[in-house]
Image: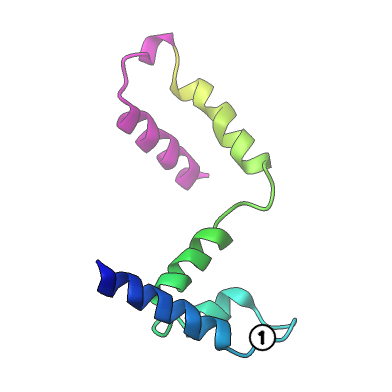
Amino acid sequence: YAKKVRKVKDELDELWRTEPASWTTDPVKWWAERRATYPRASRMAHDIFSIPGSAVAVERIFSGGRDTISLRRARLSADTIRALMISKQWIR
């Protein structure tokens, strides 16, 4: 466990010593180019960039749940509901 923590700390220390990118740099591209150098931080950045800039899409998905979960479908499992809602978004 201590070795793993040390690796993470070393990666972050190296990242903090990196020269800041210019304001015109595409952050997604910057992280993609450095994925091998900073694998853990890169995954974190990917998760952060995946957060929608607006709640509109999230609200639309949430509202769409009414169509998926109804009295007739009340016995669907959580995994089935999740799969149906994801499939519905992919189709759009």
Identify the residue position indicated by label 1 in the image: 21
Q: Is residue 23 left or right of residue 60?
A: right
Q: Is residue 70 left or right of residue 53?
A: left
Query: What number of labels is visible?
Result: 1
The picture places residue 22, in percent across and down from the top left corner, at 72, 86
- Please say whether residue 20 is one of the residues in the magenta stretch: no
Please name the amino acid that badge 1 sits on.
Ala
Q: Nearer the viewer, residue 6 or 40?
A: 6
- Please say whether residue 79 is one of the residues in the magenta stretch: yes
The picture places residue 19, in percent across and down from the top left corner, at 62, 90
Residue 1 appears in which quarter of the rendering? bottom left
**Who's the residue at 43% across and 41% down the image?**
86
The picture places residue 80, in percent across and down from the top left corner, at 32, 30
**Who's the residue at 68% across and 53% down the image?**
53
**Who's the residue at 68% across and 83% down the image?**
25
Q: Residue furthest top?
A: 71
| Residue 33 vertical position relative to residue 55 in the rendered view, above or below | below
Residue 27 appears in which quarter of the rendering? bottom right
Q: Where are the magenta residues, as a range?
A: 71-92
